[in-house]
Image (cartoon, rainbow, N blue to C red):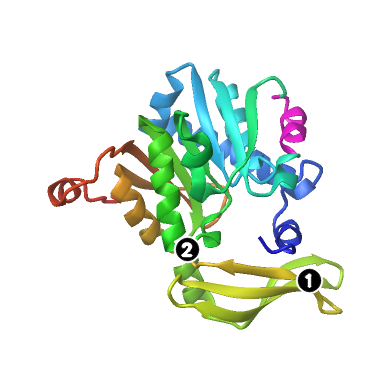
Amino acid sequence: MDRGLDKIYRLLWPMRPGDSGAIERFHRLTMEFTRLISSCEPLKRLGERGVVRILELGSGTGIAGVALSKALHGMGIGVDIDFTDIREGDLDAVEEWLETVGLRGIRHRRYVLDSRSIPKKLGGEEYDLVLFFGSPLPHLDVFEYILTVAGISQVLRRDGVYMVEQYNLGWELLRRRGFQEILLENRLGEGEALISIYTGYDEYRGVQERSYYRIPGMEYIGRMRSRLWDIASIIGINWIFFRNVEIRSFRDIREARAIISWDTRKEKPGWEELYNTLPSQE
């Protein structure tokens, strides 16, 4: 991982428990998770277990996993959660989040783990729910995401649920502004901003590379490779591994979508099975 990637993440997204923007984001996530659990049948069924075993991928500081745990706890459902990320420094904030929101006592573990390599470290585990939140997929190309979902399906119970959040980046960027070589990524304060400059595209992997600078002064922060995922591609890949896939919108998080998949296929599906489980969104 590029050494500047940690700096880019911190300048792009509020994640730390002491950040007012992160606290606001946490409360929105908690409300959205509560609504999803109450309205989505496969998630409702998980609550009947008494204790839900969760694997969170790309946890960062744990903001989404802790928000989900808070929502479940508030509904009288127990939680056992594993937080994972390739950035060990961010995982160090998990306990602070748990303490901040009154969940210090829940059972949890932290693993430094690449989402593409789930079975290597967690192959013997079995989870009720796998969570992948924070619009994480731009960091994976098509091949890497297929590896990730294959690993998820291996550690998820047959009746478990996989829930990923993603913005419909390909379509939204095309519709709103098209491709731009120089982008304003985030306003950082009075007279300061984070910008990115396009530096290349890998046609085989389908990812672009951008270099990030803090202005004024053009301070180099780091570089990041990303894929502009569209929701349909995510659903199509998930469908290969799960019989049921649906999209849910958020009430207070604009434009993001939760893609919820369940009923894991434990064997390679043939044409007839795929035909009979073709996803539809009514």
Q: Quadrant of residue 214?
A: bottom right
- Total of numbered circles in the picture? 2
Q: Is residue 228 left or right of residue 1?
A: left
User: Residue 193 got which mark?
Assistant: 1
Residue lying at the far front of the rendered structure: 120
Q: Amino acid at mark 2?
A: Asp
Above or below 80: residue 203: below
- The image position of residue 280, as x and y in percent, is 26, 51
- The image position of residue 5, as x and y in percent, is 70, 61
User: Any magenta on residue 97?
Assistant: yes
User: Residue 144 got which mark?
Assistant: none
The structure residue drawn at horizontal position 77% and vertical position 34%, both measured from the top left corner, is 96
The structure residue drawn at horizontal position 59% and vertical position 47%, both measured from the top left corner, is 58
Above or below 38: residue 175: below
Image quarter (top left, top right, bottom left or bottom right) of the N terminus: bottom right
Residue interval drawn in magenta: 93-103
Answer few, some or many: residues within 10 Å of disc 2's Cα (few below 14, many 20 plus, some between 14 and 19): some
Q: Classify mark 2: helix, strand or loop.
A: loop
Q: Classify mark 1: helix, strand or loop.
A: strand
Q: In this orientation, does residue 250 appear?
A: no
Residue lying at the far left of the rendered structure: 272
Q: Nearer the viewer, mark 2 or mark 1?
A: 2
Q: In this orientation, does residue 123 appear?
A: yes
| Main secondary structure of the magenta stretch | helix
Q: Amino acid at mark 1?
A: Ala
Above or below 64: residue 74: above
Viewer-side residue, 15 vs 155: 155
Disc 2 target residue: 141
**Disc 2 and disc 1 in contact, CB within 8 angstroms:** no
- The image position of residue 165, as x and y in percent, is 50, 50
How far apart marks 2 and 1 lie (CA) works out to 28 Å
